[in-house]
Image (cartoon, rainbow, N blue to C red):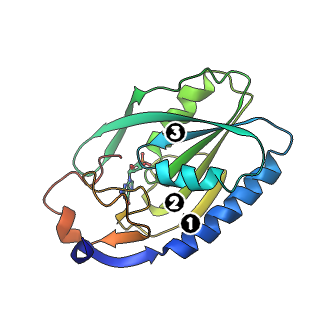
Amino acid sequence: MKEDIEEVLLPAEKIRDKVRELGQVISRDYAGKDLLAVGILKGAFIFLADLVREITIPLEIDFIAVSSYGTATETSGVVRILKDLDSPIEGRHVLLVEDIVDTGLTLKYLLEALKARNPLSLRTCALVDKPSRRVTEVQLDYVGFSIPDYFVVGYGLDFAQKYRHLPDICVLKPEVYQGTGDKNERG
Ligand code: 5GP
């Protein structure tokens, strides 16, 4: 496992501090409101679990799972909902929690799909942003870290379903994913 890692980009302590900061800002911004935090599976499961424990106002949690179709190197923006929310969001303050935003296509699709269900408000929170990869403008309300165009794993992020349990966010050695053609499958 260690031999697959090129470098630790965001160590666990740095992530913890940032998640705490995000939790404080979100708690302040939503004070007096009923919040519904929606985690995008699978990648956001660790981030969501840590984030909600830093939020001090009442909230509920739901999950949505999506898969995106694309070629080997690009997501197409065509997203399929694999697991929908358990409850309606009409009239709710919804915060969509994502692990990493790359092209922006997944989040854009989800925002449009959820907006159509008439939430009272709809915001997004992403732990990691790769702005240089963006192909579409997308609304990002809370962002943890902006990073260059590295393929990263750990803290929920996978490659071929592996490495999600790593406590740090790490850059994977290119030779690990080169040739497999599925670097950009979402997780
Ligand atoms: P987007 O639609 O913004 O291109 O794709 C977002 C999804 O692609 C993320 O939720 C994640 O599943 C996947 N993704 C994008 N960049 C990375 C990365 O650096 N590492 C991993 N593990 N997944 C990524």
Instruction: Check disc 2 and report the residue beneath it.
Output: 129
> Image check: 8 left or right of 24?
left
Q: Residue 157: name its quadrant.
A: bottom left
> Image check: 167 left or right of 33?
left
- Residue visible at 52% across and 39% down in the picture: 108
Residue 57 position (above or below residue 162): above
**Residue 61 visible to an observer of this rendering:** yes
**Residue 137 visible to an observer of this rendering:** no
Instruction: Check disc 3 and report the residue beneath it.
Output: 108
- Residue visible at 21% across and 48% down in the picture: 72
Mark before the other along the chain sequence, 3 or 2: 3
The one nearer the camera, 66 or 44, is 44
The one nearer the camera, 141 or 3, is 3
Cα distance, mark 3 to mark 1? 19 Å
Mark before the other along the chain sequence, 1 or 2: 2
Instruction: Check disc 1 and report the residue beneath it.
Output: 145
How dense is the environment of label 3, judged by Cα within 10 Å: few (below 14), some, or many (20 and up)? some
Identified by mark 3, the residue type is: Lys
Q: Is mark 3 within 8 Å of ligand 1?
A: yes
Estimate the x, y position of residue 89 in percent, counting from the top left.
Answer: 65, 24
Identified by mark 2, the residue type is: Asp
Q: Residue 145: name its quadrant.
A: bottom right
Cα distance, mark 1 to mark 2? 6 Å
How many callouts does the rendering have?
3
Q: Secondary structure at mark 3?
A: helix
Q: Secondary structure at mark 1?
A: strand
The one nearer the camera, 75 or 19, is 19
Cα distance, mark 3 to mark 2? 14 Å
Q: Check if mark 1's residue and mark 2's residue have beta carbons within 8 Å.
A: yes
Identified by mark 1, the residue type is: Phe
How dense is the environment of label 1, judged by Cα within 10 Å: few (below 14), some, or many (20 and up)? some
